[in-house]
Structure formats: C-alpha cells, structure tokens
Image: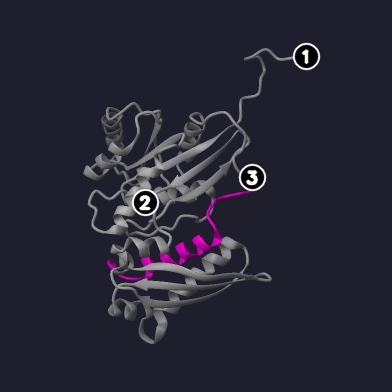
C-alpha cells in the first residue's frame, strides 16, 4: 500500500549549510556556541576576536544544520590579516543554503551596510536582531524592525538574545525551513568539522584577548607545533607569536606569571572540550610584521 503525496507523509528531512555574518562584536560566536551547546568559537568583549571560519553542527530529528561562524567584516582593510579575514567572510556567503545576518538591536551603522552589500541576492537571508535583552525601551524595537525590513526581502526576521538563548529555537526553525531536503551531511554525534589542533590554538588565543590589554591581542597569533595523543593525555606544544620584543615581555609577565595564567586557563578549557587530560607547553616568539606577511599568515592557518 502506497501513500499518496501530501497524505500522512512524514516531513522530509533537511540538511544544509548556513553562514553567520555581521559586523565585529555583534554576537556571532556567542550564537554559534549557544546553539551547539559548547564553546567552539572563542569570544571576548573585544571586537574582532574571531579570525577564521568555525563550523558548528546541529543535528535534530528533522534536520541537520552546519553553521559557519565568520570573522566580523572590516570596513577598513588595515592589514593583510584583516584583508584575509574579509576574504573569508566573502567566501563563506557563497555556496551556502541560507545566511544569518546578525545586527545589534537599535544599533545600525555603516559597518552593517558593508555586510549587507556582501549578501548574494539569490541566497535566502534570515535577519537576527541580537542583544534584545539589553533594550530598555522595547517599544523602539518595532520601528527598528520595520526599518530593517525595507533593506531586502528577508526570509524571516527574528529578535534574539544569543547570550540568554531567547528565541534561538525560533531562529533555528526559520533556518530549517530554508534547507533543501536530504540526509544528514555528518554523523549525528559530530559537533564541528574543525580539528582539535585548530580548537586548541583558538582557545589559547582567546585567553590572550581576555587577559591582555586592548591592543596587544591583535598583534598576537598562535601556532600549534606539536599535538600528540599519549594514552589518554593530549600533549600540546604551542607558540604565541608577537611583533615586538616589548610585546613578548608583556605576554610573559613578571616572573612568567601572565603566560602561566594564559596557559592554565586555556588548558582547562581544552580538557573540558576534549574530554581528557591535557599537558600544555607554551612559548612566546617575536616575528616582526607577521600581520602584514601573507605567507606567514598562511603558515599560521589563515587564508581562504
């Protein structure tokens, strides 16, 4: 006995790729981590913490969404590193099934305009208005939404709070509706396509953003020189690269205390994410002008 189309048929399973884009510090990484349920994309109060694309996989009974967190788009190309990050954003919005464009509630500026111009017309876009929990006068949200709705034909507009998880489920439902029918792209228990080596470097770099001054983290990069699994222990040797000797001294700190704090916090996060013990050794070296050297940047994992 066969079912006629549209009569008691199970809804088709859907699967596809969704890029998350927006200006710096709008909450893209917080949203990815909230949806996946663990820290895959690093965060800090400083803008432009994310430098590379990070994927998060969400598997539901009806769908699998592969989210791609992107760096905040820079309207001013101040360095080779920024130009590489912008190319990463541009590449990420091509070939996906849908796009989440994140803006901050009641705050729209020329940086948002620059992001909007990147979005292909043929790919459906869901507008996520973030940080609604910080809006004191919620009566202002409706005219703000009406203003944004005139920018383009959005597939949906969803006010959210990535930090608190407010309406994130509604956002996911809107995205699932835009995905093509198809089987899972990855195993149901996979959370990311990124390697543990990559995630270890990112967690260490996050601590530089959180523990150092406003400017120094932007001149610092992280390379993983060795990553070995020894029984249940991960042995990781990492190098923090800075541009000047004075920066090296700041990262190390008096009697090595700052570097020890950075490494200790990073190791704890690694152990939680990897589910096992981590032995972490960290050195600091000077590589002058590395943020302007595309060859050096590619060796450190940056690039398209």
Residue 131 shows in this picture = no
Expressed as whole percent of the image width and height from the top left, the position of residue 154 reads 36, 29
Q: Please, what secondary structure does the residue beneath circle 1 have?
A: loop
Residue 180 shows in this picture = yes
Disc 1 and disc 3 in contact, CB within 8 angstroms: no
Disc 1 and disc 2 in contact, CB within 8 angstroms: no
Q: Which label number is shown at residue 287?
A: none
Instruction: Say if 274 sits above or below 278 in the image.
Output: above
Q: Which residue is mark 3?
A: 187
> What residue appears at the point 47 percent right and 48 percent down from the top-left corner?
32
Residues 115 and 7: in front is 115
- Total numbered labels placed on residues in the image: 3
Expressed as whole percent of the image width and height from the top left, the position of residue 148 reads 28, 32
**Mark 1 / mark 3, whichever is N-terminal:** 1
Magenta stretch, residue numbers: 188-215
Quadrant in the picture for the N terminus? top right
Expressed as whole percent of the image width and height from the top left, the position of residue 112 reads 27, 42
**Mark 3 / mark 2, whichever is N-terminal:** 2
Tell me the distance, in whole angstroms, between the alpha carbons under discs 1 and 2: 52 Å
The part of the image, by quadrant, that contains residue 270 is: bottom right
Q: Which residue is mark 1?
A: 1
Q: Is residue 169 covered in magenta?
A: no
């Amino acid at each position: 006995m066969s079912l006629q189309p549209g009569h008691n048929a199970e809804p088709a399973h859907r699967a596809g790729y969704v890029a998350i884009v927006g200006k710096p510090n709008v909450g893209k990484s917080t949203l990815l981590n909230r949806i996946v349920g663990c820290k895959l994309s690093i965060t800090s109060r400083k803008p432009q913490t994310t430098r590379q694309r990070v994927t998060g996989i969400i598997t539901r009974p009806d769908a699998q969404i592969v989210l791609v967190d992107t760096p905040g788009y820079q309207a001013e190309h101040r360095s080779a590193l920024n130009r590489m990050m912008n190319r990463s954003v541009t590449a990420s919005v091509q070939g996906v099934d849908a796009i989440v464009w994140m803006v901050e509630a009641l705050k729209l500026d020329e940086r948002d305009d620059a992001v909007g111009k990147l979005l292909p017309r043929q790919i459906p876009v869901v507008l996520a208005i973030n940080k609604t929990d910080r809006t004191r006068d919620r009566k202002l949200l409706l005219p703000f939404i009406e203003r944004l709705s005139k920018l383009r034909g959005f597939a949906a507009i969803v006010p959210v709070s990535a930090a608190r998880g407010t309406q994130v489920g509604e956002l996911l439902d809107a995205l699932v509706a835009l995905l093509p029918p198809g089987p899972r792209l990855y195993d149901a228990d996979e959370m990311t396509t990124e390697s543990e080596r990559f995630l270890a470097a990112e967690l260490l770099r996050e601590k530089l953003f959180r523990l150092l001054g406003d400017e120094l983290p932007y001149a610092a990069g992280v390379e993983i020189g060795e990553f070995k699994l020894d029984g249940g222990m991960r042995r990781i040797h990492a190098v923090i690269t800075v541009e000047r000797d004075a920066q090296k001294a700041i990262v190390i700190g008096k009697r090595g205390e700052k570097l020890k704090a950075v490494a200790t916090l990073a190791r704890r996060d690694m152990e939680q994410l990897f589910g096992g013990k981590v032995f972490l050794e960290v050195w600091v070296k000077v590589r002058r002008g590395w943020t302007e050297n595309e060859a050096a940047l590619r060796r450190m994992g940056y690039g398209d």
